[in-house]
Amino acid sequence: MMTAATKYGGLVLAPLIWAINTQLGQILPYVDCSRRTYWSLLTSAVAIALAVTSAVVPQASSTQEEARTALFIRHLSVLVGLVFAFALMLQGGATWLLNACEH
């Protein structure tokens, strides 16, 4: 039996992970600068891993007997999950390259 998370993981979870990481990207640089920590980079790395996982899980649970519509939704979910993972990699790269204390 398929659950919604395995079928629509990349469509729902990856954008949600990206939104949370974006909001944390507004808050954590102040913490990183005041305490000399790397929470922004750590949260970006975790968010990338979660987004890739949410994109891979729908593809791993696919079967040959699926209807074409369900197969399309599953492939779209994988694609959207990978696009948001790429966006998170770009945000993580900016976190890694730019110093939060220099503003």
Image (tube, rainbow, N blue to C red):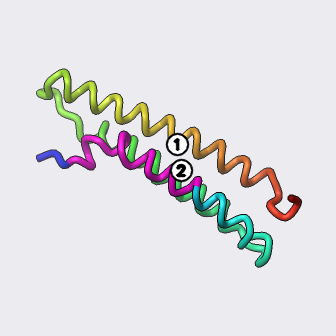
Q: Badge 1: how crowded within 10 Å, few (<14), some, or many (20+)? A: many
- The residue under label 1 is 85
Circle 2 sits in a helix, a strand or a loop, which is it? Answer: helix
Closest to the observer: 20 or 42? 20
Displayed quadrant of residue 11: top left
Residue type beneath disc 1: Ala
Residue 48 shown left or right of residue 4 in the figure = right
Q: Residue at x 18, y 21 (%)?
A: 68
Query: What are the residue bounds of the magenta stretch?
Result: 4-22
Q: Residue at x 46, y 48 (%)?
A: 51
Q: 47 above or below 7?
A: below
Residue 9 among magenta residues: yes
Mark identifier at residue 48: 2
Q: Residue at x 23, y 35 (%)?
A: 62
Residue type beneath disc 2: Ile
Closest to the observer: 97 or 24? 24
